[in-house]
Image (cartoon, rainbow, N blue to C red):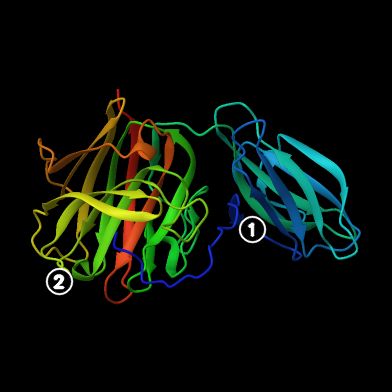
Amino acid sequence: MLPTAVAAALLLFADPPCQTDLGFQGPGTATLSICGDLLDGPGAAATLSIVNATPSTPQMLVVGLQSAPTPVSGGTLVPFPPAFTITGPVTDGAGSLALPVVGVAAAAVPVYVQSVGLLPAPEFSNALEVIVGQTSLPHAESFDGPDGADWPFPWTPVATGLIDVDLQGGRARFSASPNVVGRVVLPGFSAVDVDVTVTVEFETFFDQGFGFYARQNGGWLHHTWPVGEGYAVFLHGDWPGYGPSTLGLWRERNGVEELLATQTSPFGAGAGGTRYRIRFQVEQTSPTTTTLRAKTWLEGAAEPPAWGVVVTDSTPSLQNVAGSFAADVYNWHGSARAWMDDLSITTLP
């Protein structure tokens, strides 16, 4: 949560999020993707694309409500049993195809999609998990999945300098180049008052910091448009020149991160390979004031009854603002990794 050392002369624009790739491609080299808006309402729009398929070949889009990889015609059909199929689209002379996809006004559900080229022999694309409908709280993530897979959709990296944004050991792993605020956003939510609990583990706690944002607008400091805004909790180690390890409450306004209040962490210098729990609340306590609260403790120990750090803030652009979420990693030295796990987000009553 320190000013980034990246000297960016131009604004960076994040690529649109893409639905989760489950693999299982082949036979053939056809690749399926759905990228664009979150499909969380009638006005949302994305593009279904097929590339590297056999040219001028009819495609069958298979859609299902379950992921049950099943051997079929020399390939693996993931949406099984199929709920329905769409047959008719034909790839162009380069083996590509693009179709519009729109959102729906309903609660979010996962749908599984795969393309099968029909001629001259069955050709199976990779399969996708597609989230259709409005995301809502409560939200929980255990980050289970194969090592090396992407974070679950719709988590989207927005910062340059990020390293190893993947799943490892049932946790979300990420790192960043030294002195870069590495940010991965969780778009699609619209929440004002939230209660967040998350586990973080550091490779070398002395060198690192981890932050979690609420009321977040999808931006990253002053390097994106819109520029970053939101409220955050941040836990960091004993950085030289910055004093002891602290748990801090921060705001980001107009792309600049500003410290509001800190508590010296109860862990002293802390240690790599140790799992720390963090709880963070953001609450609109008056029409013009938000109260932020945070605490931290060792996983497996009892949660402390009292908040470690509490502060109020009246930044106009952050009051009564519904936003989404983001996770930050920071290395003041080196490029050590951090892991996030067991995330729970609920609304405050």
- Crowd tier of the residue under label 1, counting other residues whose Cα lies within 10 Å: few below 14, some 14–19, many 20 or above: some
Labels 2 and 1 touching (C-beta < 8 A): no
Q: Quadrant of the C terminus?
A: top left
Q: Quadrant of residue 317 in the image?
A: top left
In this image, 204 relative to 44: left or right? left
The answer to whether 268 appears left or right of 300 in the picture is left
Residue 328: x and y in percent read: 35, 57
Report the residue marked by disc 1. Answer: 24
Q: Quick check: can you spot residue 170?
A: no
- Residue 38: which numbered mark, if any? none
63 to 128, vertically: above or below: above
Horizontal and vertical percent position of residue 300 = 16, 47
Can residue 255 be seen from the camera position used here? yes
Please report the residue visible at 50 percent of the width from the left and 70 percent of the height from the top: 9
User: Could you tell me which residue is drawn at 22 percent across and 64 percent down?
Assistant: 273
Q: Residue at x 11, y 65 (%)?
A: 243
On screen, residue 149 above or below 229 = below
Q: Is residue 10 left or right of residue 180?
A: right
Q: Secondary structure at mark 1?
A: loop
Give the mark nearest the N terminus, 2 or 1: 1
Residue 296, how many percent across, how many down? 17, 47
Q: Which residue is mark 2?
A: 241
Q: CA distance from mark 2 to mark 1?
A: 50 Å
Q: Residue furthest top?
A: 349
The residue type indicated by label 2 comes to: Gly
Q: Residues within 10 Å of mark 2 (few under 14, many from 20)?
A: few
107 or 221, nearer to the observer: 221
Identify the residue at the far bottom of this view: 334
Quadrant location of the N terminus in the rendered image: bottom left
Q: Secondary structure at mark 2?
A: loop
Q: Quadrant of residue 84?
A: top right
Count of numbered badges drawn on the protein: 2
